[in-house]
Amino acid sequence: MTDTSRARLHAARQQFSPEVTYLNTATHGLPPLRARQALDRLTHEVAAGRFQPKDADSVVESARSAYGRLVGVPAERIAVGTHVSQFAGTIAASLPVGSEVLVAENEFTSVVFPFMARETEGIRVREVPLDRLPDEVGPGTSLVAVAAVQSADGAIAPLADLVTACADHGARLMLDTTQSFGWLPLPADRVDFTVCSTYKWALGPRGAAFLTGTPGALATLRPLAPNWFAGADPWSSLYGGPLRLADAPRRLDLAPVWPAWYGLLPALELIEEVGVETIRAHDTALGDRLRTAMGLEPAGSAIVSLEVSEEAARRAAEAGIVTALRDGRLRASFHLYNDEDDVDRLVKALT
């Protein structure tokens, strides 16, 4: 890591003030100071009666553009919403009857439930092991839906092989990047659909999400919940007909939860300043430090899943270390506000 990268990491770290050893970004990230200040200003404006909803439009558009720069997708190919399941549901609703959808075993339900909910309508959902997904794509596969990084254990999907397998068989690929955006660079411009909630490594408040896609894939989607914000001119689309939705992905926009976007924009700007590659090197080094200390092979993930005793988990909690229990295992996850001392503190508590 270069001196410049280290300096940027150090500067970013000053934006956070956890009062515990926080190793739980996979549940939700900590807001940086600049995001908290933006939310404080918004709350003051609302309480003072000076907030105008139109004022939020530029914030949403700036966040859309910042996200586009970070993932390498033009802003005009990005829709905004509130949760991954809404966008996954839009994709599911656009599949023709008889489609086969491949998903990973033990996948997060916001990725799979929207497709399983259509099984009574003739959609077939098939669960296979994560590492077998590329091999299971065939001529009858319409879509592969998978998280780029698994919520339960931090396993990274075989992305390059999936992109190739889907292209070879004419299937589309939907990646949930909620657990990867902000630390794992991905070829989003070559993926049919990506869906992302931004309250984890993106460090935003809960209530903002993005959908990206290739032009051909996006053209197949019809709005599942068309609304005024998806109008060609949102503030002239408040009442009555005719239907007048925007072109391109903006027709898929969902009305924004305004505070979420006010908190998200400064967080995205911070990630841009540090750089995703720098964050990846930092976060994964901490994850691999923990894995090595616990007798596991490095995996290059910011999420580590450990099989530990209830007593060990209790010791960690009593030491002020915040982790999560997922799928019967202790899950630790690392980001900008963590360092090697945090890892060593957890290892000491567990061992």
Image (spheres, rainbow, N blue to C red):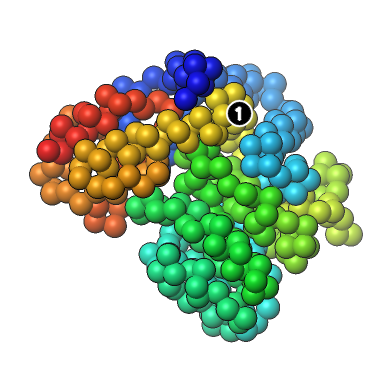
Toward the viewer: 269 or 170?
A: 170
**In the image, is 17 to the left or to the right of 65?**
left
Residue at 43% over, 59% down: 108
The quadrant of the image that shows the C terminus is top left
Q: Position of residue 48 (x, y in %)?
A: 63, 19
Asked whether, in this view, residue 13 is left or right of residue 261, the answer is left
Q: Residue at point 70% right, 21% down? A: 50
Q: Residue at x 84, y 53 (%)?
A: 247
Type of amino acid under label 1: Glu
Q: Quadrant of residue 162?
A: bottom right
Q: Residues within 10 Å of mark 1 (few under 14, many from 20)?
A: some
Q: Position of residue 209 (x, y in %)?
A: 60, 46
The image position of residue 131, as x and y in percent, is 42, 65
Relative to 309, residue 242 above or below: below
Depth check, front residue: 145 or 240: 145
Q: Secondary structure at mark 1?
A: helix
Between 53 and 7, the one lying in front of the other is: 7
Left or right: 143 in relation to 289: right
Tell me if residue 190 comes above or below residue 5 in the rendering: below
In the rendered view, would you say 109 is above or below 44? below
Q: Is residue 258 left or right of residue 150?
A: right
**Residue 86 appears in the figure:** no
**Residue on which disc 1 sits:** 272
What residue do we see at 31% from left, 22% from top? 19
Q: Nearer the viewer, residue 315 or 149?
A: 149
Q: Give percent across and percent down for residue 337.
A: 40, 25
